[in-house]
Amino acid sequence: MTDEPSGVDARMIAYYGEGEERDRLLQSGSGRLEYLRTRELLARYLPAAPATLLDVGGGAGVYALPLAEEGYSVHLIDPVPLHVEQACVASADRPGASLADARVGDARRLPFGDQSVDAVLLLGPLYHLTTRDDRVLALQEA
């Protein structure tokens, strides 16, 4: 794990560094509905396990960990060091949910070669990247 990537909005890092995001999708209400619907769509459209997935902006691993339990090899990248730390701790605490890798990184500069994974999850970065050019770059990287 390294420090935050350069060029990432420091306000976003500070906000998420407060640690409130980890459980947001697993609680009741709209966050829980978002989580359940996203899991439904992932089950429908992801290739069958054992496939290799890249979860870009994967936070504390809310999607990556269950996918790892289902037999996927999951690499998680997030710009927030706390999120990567939380994902690593949760992975170590959940037998059968070991992440292949978790590291601090930027959706606009992924450390993976073309065609090196079977699918890419890009759930958070598209609303955190506020310029069209940055969103296009993240999509091209994915």
Image: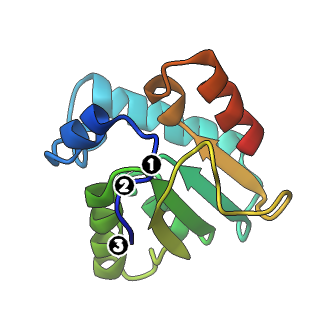
Element carrying mark 1: loop
Residue depicted at x 36% and y 28%: 33
Which picture quadrant has residue 31?
Answer: top left
Residue type, mark 2 in image: Glu
Q: Which mark is residue 4?
A: 2
Mark sitting earlier along the chain (3/1): 1
Where residue 128 appears, as percent x and y from the top left, is 44, 28
| Horizontal arrangement in the rendering, residue 89 relative to residue 78 (left or right) | left
Circle on res. 88:
3
At 25% from the left and 58% from the top, the residue drawn is 82
Tell me how far mark 2 sits from mark 1, CA to CA: 6 Å
Q: What kind of element bears circle 2?
A: loop
Q: Earlier in the sequence, mark 2 or mark 3?
A: 2
Q: Quadrant of the N terminus?
A: bottom left
Q: Is residue 116 in sight in this rendering?
A: yes
Q: Which mark is residue 68?
A: none
- Contact? badges 2 and 1 (CB < 8 Å): yes
- Look at mark 1 in the image and give the residue it sits on: 6
**What residue do we see at 47% from left, 68% from top?**
102
The image quadrant of residue 139 is top right
The correct choice, above or below, for 129 with respect to 82 in the image is: above
Q: Nearer the viewer, residue 46 or 99?
A: 99
